[in-house]
Image (tube, rainbow, N blue to C red):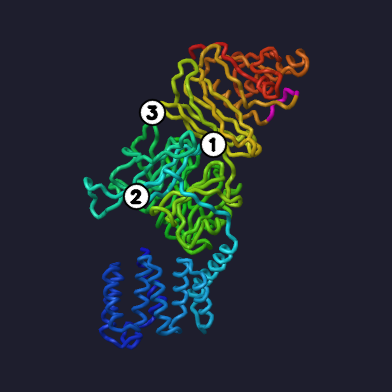
């Protein structure tokens, strides 16, 4: 499709003549014959034969302008922009007033090579033409704007000091880095030569996924091929980790069972091993080209590129889809014209903050090729206008495949810059203006509090202020591993659930940068049994009061759900304080606080016969009262199972 459009563009812009010899710039019938044969091959998408015949036409008449223009287009198709520019310069030499469009095309090619001054000179030449058609004027304005941006960006560079990431690069091309939130695992796509034992018709390269692990000293291990079942004899690449590294989305191409030329697959880690990647199916994958997945930290929202999709603004657009609780994906939504333009938008990366999107685009004003941009998801669900990351992060070449760590201060990308062995993985400190929101995380193991068995449990993270669920995931079957991301600036309630167990509760107040440290927390789960108890970490009261804070609703409703699900449970609600003030005052305060929870449960349908409450004041501390941290732990509300019947 793209080739056909280019052919039509070439004809419309440069060959507005009848195919009669008197309308060409040559009188040589042989040259015209060769040229028309070349055009026929070009129309059939046979560039090799088209080039052969256009060279024969030029050999017959070296001043045959139309032949030089066709050769320029063929050089463009081959991405030989230097050769393309040479052809335009030959046209200028033959007839500098032939057509304003040629100056536009020359400037466009020079922009792709970073020849900004030469491009400016050719754009300026267009002003001397008395007539410039509307289409040429429109595209000239676009190139002119990009030149202004590029020259200004070069004069105002952003801080950028890329360093080769030691150990993770192979002797082959390495690209598409993806990273876990704790920066302990780095997966790259590696282009390998086809093993002679397993020949693949028409191919001499294939893509596999390699993984490197962070050592205790902070360096990376040598990358290892992830092997089967993730890697096969087909191409696997352009991957994205879920934040915990327990799920991997990847692009797989040219499989017989696929919906299109490339589809998105997903693999999950179970008992320490990867499952066979499975096609995530419709409606995400289609007869079009779907690739470059990027998952939000919990893996429940997916951003990806789609080529030639029905609702696309350009050749490739960025879409978003969400996961339903039944495991199906919703119909993808185009991110709209603030992100997607008439050109290609690719390689989306959604940062763990959930609202900063990095992507590559040739539609927005940039340095020449595909540039890296960032945009923010606004409160109303729309995207801000993209911002170019600046020079020299962006250059005249294509910049694709950027990932940023959870903390937001360091990024990884691939480049074939000087000193590399082809495409290699580089890292650099993010300039302040291009950083996303800071994100930390909590990770650990979920286990049975009595047996120590590792458990697969469900995790829910709520914004306490709004009650909105921010994260939903699970720990790994067999190992109990989990990782939950925590964007700074909010207070969170974390709940852990497992069938047959009491839920586990934790609170994280992350209101400033000083709290941006990672948290390690193992989660002991207690089976539902008489005597089992938990502290309700997200039940709050106003200072020295027994009035429930509105922020308590999420956790209290969790307790209501537990009691509704397990009708045979009877519980005591216990209130506890620190040792500030008299025992009498604290006992009364704790009793009233326990009663407030008791009343909430009754008002939400729980039978009062299943509930008791008591206030213990500061008689049962769980930490020292000599520090503020200890006193905060002692101020708590908990519940204890007093009876379990067979209901």
Can residue 5 be seen?
A: no
What residue is rendered at 52% in x and 15% in y?
568
Horizontal and vertical percent for residue 460? 53, 32
Depth check: give the residue in front, 198 or 138. 198
Left or right: residue 562 compared with residue 542: left
Depth check: give the residue in front, 307 or 239. 239
Horizontal and vertical percent for residue 75? 36, 70
In the rendered view, tell whether residue 217 sits above or below residue 240. above
Left or right: residue 356 compared with residue 219: right
Mark 2 to mark 3: distance in Å?
29 Å
Range of residues picked out in magenta:
544-549
In the rendered view, tell whether residue 294 sits above or below residue 525. below
Q: Which residue is mark 1?
A: 485
First in sequence: mark 2 vs mark 1 = 2
In the rendered view, tell whether residue 476 sits above or below residue 22. above
Q: Which residue is mark 2?
A: 191
- SS at mark 3 in the image: loop
Q: Which residue is mark 3?
A: 271
In the image, residue 546 lies in the stretch drawn in magenta: yes
Horizontal and vertical percent for residue 252? 35, 47
- Within 10 Å of disc 2 (Cα), the crowding (few <14, some 14-19, many 20+) is many
**Res 479 quadrant in image:** top left
Mark 2 to mark 1: distance in Å?
32 Å
Depth check: give the residue in front, 570 or 173. 173
Horizontal and vertical percent for residue 346? 45, 54
In the rendered view, tell whether residue 501 sits above or below residue 268. above
- Within 10 Å of disc 1 (Cα), the crowding (few <14, some 14-19, many 20+) is many
- Within 10 Å of disc 3 (Cα), the crowding (few <14, some 14-19, many 20+) is few
Mark 1 to mark 3: distance in Å?
22 Å
């Amino acid at each position: 499709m793209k080739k056909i459009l280019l052919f039509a563009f070439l004809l419309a812009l440069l060959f507005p003549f009848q195919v009669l010899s008197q309308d060409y710039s040559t009188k040589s019938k042989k040259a015209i014959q060769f040229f028309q044969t070349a055009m026929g091959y070009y129309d059939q998408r046979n560039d090799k034969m088209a080039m052969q015949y256009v060279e024969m036409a030029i050999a017959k008449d070296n001043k045959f302008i139309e032949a030089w223009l066709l050769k320029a287009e063929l050089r463009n198709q081959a991405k030989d922009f230097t050769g393309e520019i040479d052809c335009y310069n030959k046209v200028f030499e033959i007839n500098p007033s032939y057509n304003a469009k040629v100056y536009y095309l020359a400037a466009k090619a020079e922009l792709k090579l970073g020849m900004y001054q030469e491009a400016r000179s050719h754009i300026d030449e267009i002003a001397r033409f008395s007539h410039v058609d509307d289409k040429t004027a429109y595209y000239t304005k676009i190139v002119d704007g990009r030149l202004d941006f590029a020259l200004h960006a070069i004069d105002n560079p952003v801080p950028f000091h890329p360093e080769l990431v030691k150990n993770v690069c192979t002797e082959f091309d390495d690209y598409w880095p993806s990273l876990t939130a704790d920066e302990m695992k780095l997966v790259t796509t590696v282009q390998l030569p086809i093993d002679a034992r397993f020949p693949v018709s028409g191919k001499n390269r294939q893509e596999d996924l390699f993984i490197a692990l962070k050592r205790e000293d902070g360096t990376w291990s040598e990358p290892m091929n992830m092997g089967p079942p993730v890697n096969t004899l087909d191409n696997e690449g352009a991957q994205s980790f879920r934040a915990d590294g327990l799920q991997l989305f990847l692009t797989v191409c040219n499989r017989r069972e696929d919906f299109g030329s490339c589809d998105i697959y997903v693999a999950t880690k179970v008992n320490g091993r990867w499952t066979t990647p499975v096609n995530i199916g419709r409606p995400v994958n289609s007869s079009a080209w779907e690739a470059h997945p990027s998952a939000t930290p919990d893996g429940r929202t997916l951003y990806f590129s789609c080529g030639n999709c029905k609702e696309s603004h350009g050749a490739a657009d960025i879409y978003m889809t969400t996961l339903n609780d039944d495991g199906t994906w919703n119909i993808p939504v185009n991110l709209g014209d603030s992100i997607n333009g008439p050109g290609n938008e690719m390689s989306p990366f959604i940062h763990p903050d959930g609202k900063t999107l990095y992507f590559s685009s040739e539609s927005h004003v940039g340095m020449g090729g595909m540039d890296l941009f960032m945009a923010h998801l606004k409160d109303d669900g729309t995207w801000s206008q993209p911002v170019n990351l600046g020079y020299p992060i962006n250059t005249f070449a294509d910049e694709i495949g950027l990932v940023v760590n959870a903390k937001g201060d360091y990024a990884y990308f691939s480049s074939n810059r000087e000193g590399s062995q082809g495409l290699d993985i580089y890292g650099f400190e993010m300039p302040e203006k291009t950083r996303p929101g800071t994100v930390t995380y909590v990770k650990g193991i979920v286990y049975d509090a009595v047996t120590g068995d590792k458990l697969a449990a469900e995790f829910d993270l709520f914004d306490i202020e709004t009650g909105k669920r921010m994260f939903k995931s699970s720990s790994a079957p067999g190992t109990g591993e989990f990782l939950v991301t925590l964007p700074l600036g909010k207070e969170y309630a974390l709940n852990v659930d497992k069938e047959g167990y009491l839920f586990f509760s934790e609170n994280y107040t992350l209101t400033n940068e000083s709290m941006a440290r990672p948290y390690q927390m193992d989660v002991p789960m207690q089976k539902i049994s008489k005597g089992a108890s938990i502290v309700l970490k997200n039940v709050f009261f106003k200072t020295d009061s027994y009035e429930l804070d509105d922020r308590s609703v999420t956790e209290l409703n969790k307790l209501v759900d537990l009691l509704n699900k397990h009708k045979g449970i009877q519980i005591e609600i216990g209130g506890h304080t620190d040792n500030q003030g008299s025992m009498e005052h604290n006992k009364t305060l704790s009793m009233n606080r326990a009663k407030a929870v008791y009343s909430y449960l009754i008002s939400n349908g729980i039978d009062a016969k299943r509930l008791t409450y008591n206030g213990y004041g500061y008689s049962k501390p769980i930490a020292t009262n000599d520090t503020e941290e200890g006193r905060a732990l002692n101020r708590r509300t908990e519940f204890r199972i007093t009876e379990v019947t067979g209901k």
